[in-house]
Image (tube, rainbow, N blue to C red):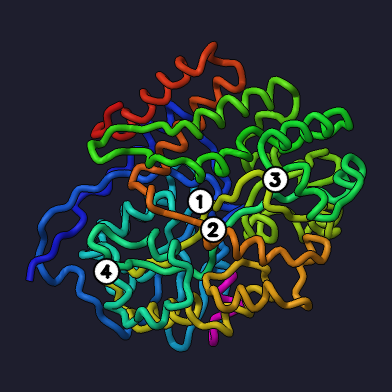
């Protein structure tokens, strides 16, 4: 039998990067921060034996962009032994971590190279498992370089408690699930309790929410915060995911034409007002200036993010940070949204299919391990039953959030996430849009129309098959 294989993984980041100069810090700070752009892929016919799975390999090669998944395996996968910073052991199998930071599309470029060489790679050098983010998952799941989870023995019954959207992200164009995730990423507005007491008279989540229940109240409260010497958010970039997740249109229509939803224009207009009014700055997310608000002296009231941001990215282990002292609280904010997530994909050609399947089942389907991840890491896991149980457990609390249990908010948000608008172009287009519109917000363009022209130039340079 002949199979369609990925012939070319077109990585255009090196060209577009020179035009847009986008920075990214998921390599050290988050599981799903502004990710490097995805790229379209062409498929070609190849022989039938290139991607057959095998088992009994002595080396498990895992590709990732940071150490979040590595820490999850070390802490929660039964029998995992850490050898050193790049190596582990599971039984008699050596685990090799091939970690490449996300900046300038480096992770995807390296992953593409390794997958394209998969057929000719020596047995112990073949990629067995790799991680992807939502913004570019389609780039890999719509090719035969990823295995259907059912081919590994991961069944619908195994995944019955997972949130549907997490499966939609890694479902290919034929309706086949090609990956799985241990986490869900509904977002909340994370606020500084001390500032809330000073400016609004209370740090109670219900009371604080009244000041931020819609965007008009958000702006009114931003003015009060400014008068008290604070920024409502660190940067105009903080609110982008909230507006973008609530857009009605996908980035690209069925005719490969770029679409800019009205809600994305609203983000530009609202962000321009925030910046011009002095309610926030224009820092790049993950920059040192942006993260100053993790500390009291940064004078930033809030950030928007999911559970991974709270406990993985906000310096909770650093003495003097707001998180370290349990100084944050969480509210729904003006609108619900999601941000990021990490998915596990099995590489076709793996010689450790049984071990990859066991990792998928234990780390994304086992309720006891799922619960342990929540209790020890405060991550929001991809198991509805576990999350609803803990959401109603009075003994569960998040120390970073001053003892608050935010899980009911997270559960409600997870149920509302809809991935119907996901396209293979999302990562690149949202990056180019933020870059061009950011220049307008900063005053480098006189009008939105000028910035839109720049966006289209960046987008069609990155993706020549698109029109506008």
Q: CA gap, disc 4 to disc 1?
A: 23 Å
Residue position for label 3:
303
Q: Is residue 361 above or below residue 243?
A: below
- Magenta stretch encompasses residue 103: no
The answer to whether one can see residue 33 in this image is yes
Locate residue 467, reporting x and y percent. Answer: 27, 28
Residue range corresponding to the magenta coloring = 71-79
Q: Is residue 226 above or below residue 12?
A: above
**Element at label 4:** loop
Q: Considering only order in the chain, which callout, 4 or 2, is on the residue closer to the N terminus?
A: 2
User: What predominant SS class does the magenta segment belong to?
Assistant: helix
Locate residue 161, reporting x and y percent. Answer: 48, 76
The 10 Å Cα crowd at callout 1, few under 14, some 14 to 19, many 20 or more, is many
Q: CA gap, disc 2 to disc 4?
A: 22 Å
The single residue placed furthest to the left in the displayed view is: 1
Observer-nearest of 257 and 413: 413
* Tags 3 and 1 touching, CB below 8 Å: no
Locate residue 133, reporting x and y percent. Answer: 45, 55
Q: CA gap, disc 3 to disc 2?
A: 22 Å
Looking at the rendering, which quadrant does residue 50 occupy? bottom left
* Tags 2 and 1 touching, CB below 8 Å: yes
Query: Where the N terminus falls, by quadrant?
Result: bottom left
Residue position for label 4:
348
Residue position for label 1:
101
Query: Which-is-in-front pick, marks 3 and 1?
Result: 3
Residue position for label 2:
66
Q: CA gap, disc 2 to disc 1?
A: 6 Å
Q: CA gap, disc 3 to disc 1?
A: 23 Å
Query: Which-is-in-front pick, marks 4 and 3?
Result: 3
């Amino acid at each position: 039998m002949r199979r369609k294989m990925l012939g070319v993984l077109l990585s255009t980041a090196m060209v577009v990067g020179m035009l847009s100069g986008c920075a990214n810090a998921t390599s050290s700070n988050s599981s799903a921060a502004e990710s490097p752009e995805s790229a379209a892929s062409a498929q070609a016919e190849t022989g039938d034996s290139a991607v057959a799975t095998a088992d009994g390999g002595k080396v498990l090669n895992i590709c990732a962009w940071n150490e979040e998944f590595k820490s999850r395996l070390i802490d929660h996968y039964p029998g995992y032994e850490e050898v050193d910073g790049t190596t582990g052991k599971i039984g008699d199998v050596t685990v090799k971590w091939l970690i490449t930071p996300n900046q300038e599309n480096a992770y995807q470029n390296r992953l593409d190279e390794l997958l394209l060489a998969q057929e000719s790679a020596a047995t112990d050098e073949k990629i067995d498992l790799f991680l992807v983010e939502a913004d570019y998952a389609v780039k890999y799941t719509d090719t035969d370089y990823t295995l259907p989870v059912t081919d590994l023995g991961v069944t619908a019954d195994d995944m019955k408690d997972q949130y549907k959207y997490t499966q939609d992200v890694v479902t290919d164009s034929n309706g086949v699930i090609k990956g799985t995730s241990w986490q869900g990423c509904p977002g909340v507005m994370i606020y500084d309790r001390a500032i809330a007491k000073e400016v609004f008279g209370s740090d109670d989540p219900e009371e604080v929410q009244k000041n931020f229940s819609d965007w008009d109240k958000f702006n009114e409260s931003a003015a009060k915060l400014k008068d008290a010497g604070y920024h409502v958010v660190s940067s105009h970039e903080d609110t982008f995911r909230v507006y973008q997740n609530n857009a009605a249109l996908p980035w690209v229509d069925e005719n490969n034409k770029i679409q800019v939803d009205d809600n994305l224009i609203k983000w530009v207009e609202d962000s321009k007002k925030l910046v011009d009014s002095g309610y926030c700055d224009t820092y790049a997310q993950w920059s040192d200036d942006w993260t100053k608000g993790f500390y009291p002296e940064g004078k930033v009231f809030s950030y928007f993010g999911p559970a991974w941001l709270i406990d993985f990215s906000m310096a909770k282990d650093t003495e003097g940070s707001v998180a370290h002292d349990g100084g944050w609280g969480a509210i729904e904010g003006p609108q619900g949204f999601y941000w990021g997530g990490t998915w596990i994909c099995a590489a076709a050609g793996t010689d450790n299919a049984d071990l990859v399947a066991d990792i998928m089942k234990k780390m994304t389907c086992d309720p006891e391990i799922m619960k342990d991840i929540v209790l020890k890491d405060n991550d929001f896991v991809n198991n509805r039953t576990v999350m609803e149980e803990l959401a109603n457990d009075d003994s569960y609390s998040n120390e970073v959030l001053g003892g608050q249990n935010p899980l009911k908010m997270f559960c409600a948000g997870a149920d509302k996430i809809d991935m119907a608008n996901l396209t293979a172009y999302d990562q690149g287009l949202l990056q180019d849009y933020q870059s061009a519109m950011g220049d307008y917000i900063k005053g480098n363009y006189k009008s939105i129309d000028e910035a839109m022209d720049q966006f289209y130039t960046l987008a069609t340079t990155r993706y020549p098959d698109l029109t506008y």
